[in-house]
Image (spheres, coloured by chain):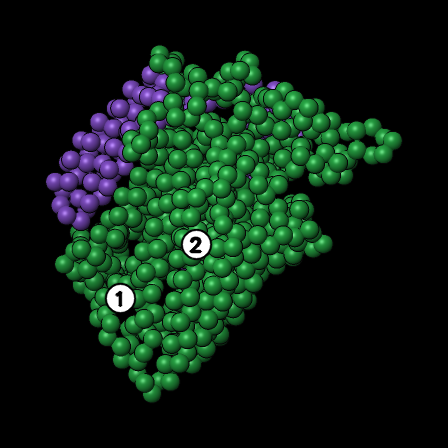
Chain colours: A purple, B green
């Protein structure tokens, strides 16, 4: 976890320095704002990972001498199939098209998207349709 | 929940066909990263063919002066959609949606991407966005025709009215969200689902590059999405963010767009740098030369690429020239390190020139030229002269064609056996490569000369007395050669489909974890993984006398050290060493009545 945190922190710090130099050299706001955003995007998750890395034992994937059996146990949930991402994608496209052709398709899109979100939640509680 | 299987027999599990639906429903509902990766690859390749067809029409139009194969309006639509489809729908999604989706979980020993359903949603957003973009051609005003960069005020509702440009905006928002979700998924997968022993500095370079690409996506794409929302508001609800008339600032669009646009170039390039690094090492039968230097070069390129956006805007007169020029020059340093390491990887290696290796070496040559002409353009005085000429067109095609097409074909032919379990025909692959390599230079070298002679980009016609005819005609011949090359590659895919030649698990004697499993891999990827003691676990396992790390090599009369011992014990009983993420059966994920902690969507 430490390496992950350090990579993000390094990227964040780089943008912090560049944002400072850019601001004082150019006095241009939009670029400075975006560089500051990039600085925070590295700093926040990077700081979070680094903070945790100092409070936990190295995970098996962080330990160069880890044995394969150390990865035993629960890893995560990996549903094999679900129709809801497809439905949600179509609903999102329908909402998007409303920005071109009128708001009637947004109504359809939001209703279908709501159904898809409910479907996903139910599916997660059941462990996924697989 | 997915848990470790208790016994070896449990690992074998039911065959893949028993997991979920089959046929069309499988492609609609699957959340398996391999199926989604294949869907992305096929879809992106189809978009590549469509955008390539547009390029052929463009080149045919320019083959003669005063040509009228298409009208000027249609020509504008064609070059806009050629750029948009190639960049937004082919180059990026082919890498981070296709290759990375399929390969990254395999390279790190993971059973799937971290958020499988989010992964599927990414694909459907991408497909629907791409379809909406192309459907713009069917509207009465035609598709978007303001160039792939949509500069204000050309992209406002007075200069480019109609539904087509609005559809372009919506399509980019949808594909932008798709990319952001994929970026999140890639970072989470690489951070949390690596196999035991696979530390960050043992990951294959391709996976490293995809991690950095994921971070770049998260930096760049939200800016584009925000800018597109502003553009839509300007066009449709009367805001004046980018229009002078209402107190807005047109050049703000360029700042926002290029803050996305330049990292985007590296979002497109870095994955293929990773492909080529892996391919060069495998076909030279050597570890990557300067492994850590390669990683730091990748991170440096990514960081610098986000600090050079305004070098596309030198001629606007509103940007800080020395800052952006210096930062642009600096990118040459890590890129030079990469070239040095690529050559070092091949140096004194036992090289075999199979199709993937040919494309990788072709990439080196082509990208070098594109990179060097990029150094020219980083100099403001040169850029003032060359801006918006065919010199720039040739430069970015050398960079992007070099990485995306040469690198992409290298990756596709390298991993095709893993995707399908079948080999491609090497002879057809080589024919395709040579047609592409020669065709590439014939197409783009004349464009440098045309740029020097002052031919502007994005013009549908020129006059006979401009004396640009011969060079344009040569360029068009080259474009047809490229078309032929892609056709031969398609024939190769067709042949592999009609007359399959089984590939085996590791036909290239490759190094990294994806080659430790079967081709194509089983459900949840691995029944067994080798011990991971270096960045080349499969090589170390298969060649215990030539392991990657010196201290792991057995010495005559001395004691064997950890890596070699682990490799041998595993070799004596291939299934003895199962464990970790290799041993997922997915049993709990499939059982109803789970405790509600199912991830994959959060």
SS for callout 1: helix
Q: Could you tell me if residue B112 is visible in this image?
A: yes
Give the residue drawn at x 33%, y 17%. Answer: A125
| C-alpha distance separating marks 2 and 1 | 29 Å
Pick the front one: B546 or B192: B546
Residue on which the image places disc 2:
B489
In the image as oriented, which residue stretches furthest toward the right?
B557
The disc, 2 or 1, on the residue closer to the chain's N-terminal end is 1
SS for callout 2: helix
Instruction: Find residue A2 and report its horizontal and vertical position in percent.
Output: 59, 33
Return the chain for callout 2: B
Q: Is residue B330 left or right of residue B595?
A: right
Return the chain for callout 1: B
Q: Is residue A88 left or right of residue B100?
A: left
Q: Are marks 2 and 1 on the same chain?
A: yes
Give the residue drawn at x 47%, y 52%. Answer: B409
For label 1, the crowd category at 10 Å Cα-Cα, with few meaning under 14, some 14 to 19 and many 20 or more, is: many
Instruction: Find residue B171 and report its horizontal and vertical position in percent.
Output: 27, 48
The quarter holding residue B51 reads bottom left
In the image as oriented, which residue stretches furthest toward the front?
B499
Pick the front one: B89 or B392: B89
Q: Could you tell me if residue B385 is visible in this image?
A: no
Give the residue drawn at x 56%, y 16%. Answer: B8
- Specify the label residue B76 is tagged with: 1
Give the residue drawn at x 42%, y 69%. Answer: B478
Instruction: Find residue B85 and report its horizontal and vertical position in percent.
Output: 33, 55
């Amino acid at each position: 976890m430490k390496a992950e945190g350090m990579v993000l922190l390094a990227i964040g710090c780089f943008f912090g320095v560049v944002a400072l130099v850019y601001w004082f050299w150019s006095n241009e706001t939009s670029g400075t704002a975006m560089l500051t955003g990039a600085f925070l995007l590295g700093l926040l998750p990077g700081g979070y990972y680094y903070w945790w890395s100092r409070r936990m034992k190295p995970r098996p994937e962080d330990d160069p001498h880890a044995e394969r059996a150390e990865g035993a146990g629960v890893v995560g949930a990996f549903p094999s199939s679900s129709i809801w991402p497809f439905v949600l994608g179509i609903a999102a496209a329908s909402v998007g098209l409303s920005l071109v052709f009128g708001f009637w398709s947004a109504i359809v899109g939001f209703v279908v998207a709501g159904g898809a979100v409910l479907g996903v939640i139910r599916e997660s509680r059941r462990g996924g349709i697989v | 929940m997915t848990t470790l299987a208790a016994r070896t027999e449990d690992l074998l599990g039911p065959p893949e066909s028993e997991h979920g639906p089959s046929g069309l429903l499988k492609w609609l509902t699957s959340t398996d990263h391999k199926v989604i990766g294949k869907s992305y690859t096929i879809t992106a390749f189809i978009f590549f063919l469509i955008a390539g067809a547009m390029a052929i029409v463009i080149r045919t139009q320019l083959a003669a002066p005063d040509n009228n194969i298409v009208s000027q309006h249609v020509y504008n639509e064609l070059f806009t959609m050629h750029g948009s489809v190639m960049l937004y729908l082919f180059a990026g999604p082919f890498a981070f949606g296709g290759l990375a989706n399929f390969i990254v979980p395999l390279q790190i020993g993971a059973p799937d991407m971290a958020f499988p359903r989010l992964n599927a949603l990414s694909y459907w957003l991408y497909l629907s966005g791409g379809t909406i973009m192309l459907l713009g051609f069917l509207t009465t005003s035609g598709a978007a025709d303001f160039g792939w960069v949509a500069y204000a005020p050309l992209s406002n509702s007075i200069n480019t009215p109609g539904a087509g440009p609005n559809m372009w905006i919506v399509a980019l928002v949808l594909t932008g969200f798709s990319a952001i979700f994929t970026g999140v998924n890639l970072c989470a997968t690489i951070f949390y689902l690596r196999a035991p022993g696979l530390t960050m500095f043992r990951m294959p370079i391709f996976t490293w590059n995809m991690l950095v690409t994921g971070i770049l996506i998260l930096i760049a794409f939200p800016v584009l999405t925000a800018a597109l929302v502003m553009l839509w508001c300007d066009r449709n609800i009367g805001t004046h963010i980018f229009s002078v008339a209402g107190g807005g600032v047109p050049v703000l669009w360029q700042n926002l767009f290029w803050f996305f646009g330049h990292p985007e170039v590296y979002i497109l390039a870095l994955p293929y740098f990773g492909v080529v690094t892996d391919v060069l090492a495998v076909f030279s039968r050597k570890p990557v030369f300067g492994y850590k230097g390669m990683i730091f070069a990748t991170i440096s390129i990514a960081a610098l690429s986000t600090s050079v956006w305004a070098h596309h805007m030198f001629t606007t007169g509103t940007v800080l020239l020395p800052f952006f020029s210096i930062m642009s020059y600096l990118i040459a340093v890590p890129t030079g390190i990469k070239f040095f390491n690529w050559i070092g990887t091949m140096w004194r290696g036992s090289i075999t020139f199979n199709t993937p290796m040919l494309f990788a070496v072709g990439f080196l040559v082509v990208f070098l030229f594109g990179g060097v002409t990029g150094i020219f353009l980083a100099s403001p005085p040169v850029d003032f002269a060359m801006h918006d000429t065919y010199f720039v067109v040739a430069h970015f095609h050398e960079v992007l064609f070099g990485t995306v097409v040469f690198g992409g074909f290298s990756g596709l032919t390298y991993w095709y056996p893993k995707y399908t379990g079948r080999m491609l025909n090497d002879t057809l692959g080589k024919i395709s490569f040579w047609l592409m390599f020669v065709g590439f230079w014939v197409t783009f070298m004349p464009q440098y000369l045309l740029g020097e002679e002052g031919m502007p980009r994005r013009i549908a016609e020129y006059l006979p007395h401009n004396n640009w005819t011969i060079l344009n005609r040569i360029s068009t011949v080259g474009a047809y050669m490229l078309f032929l090359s892609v056709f031969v590659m398609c024939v190769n895919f067709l042949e592999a489909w009609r007359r399959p030649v089984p590939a085996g698990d590791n036909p290239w004697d490759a190094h990294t974890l994806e080659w430790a499993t079967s081709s194509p891999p089983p459900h949840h990827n691995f029944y067994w993984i080798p011990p991971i003691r270096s960045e080349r676990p499969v090589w170390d396992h298969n060649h215990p006398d030539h392991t990657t790390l010196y201290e792991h090599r057995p010495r005559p009369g001395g004691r064997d050290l950890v890596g070699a011992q682990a490799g041998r014990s595993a070799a004596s009983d291939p299934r003895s060493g199962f464990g970790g993420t290799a041993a997922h059966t997915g049993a709990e994920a499939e059982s109803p009545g789970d405790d509600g902690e199912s991830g994959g969507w959060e």
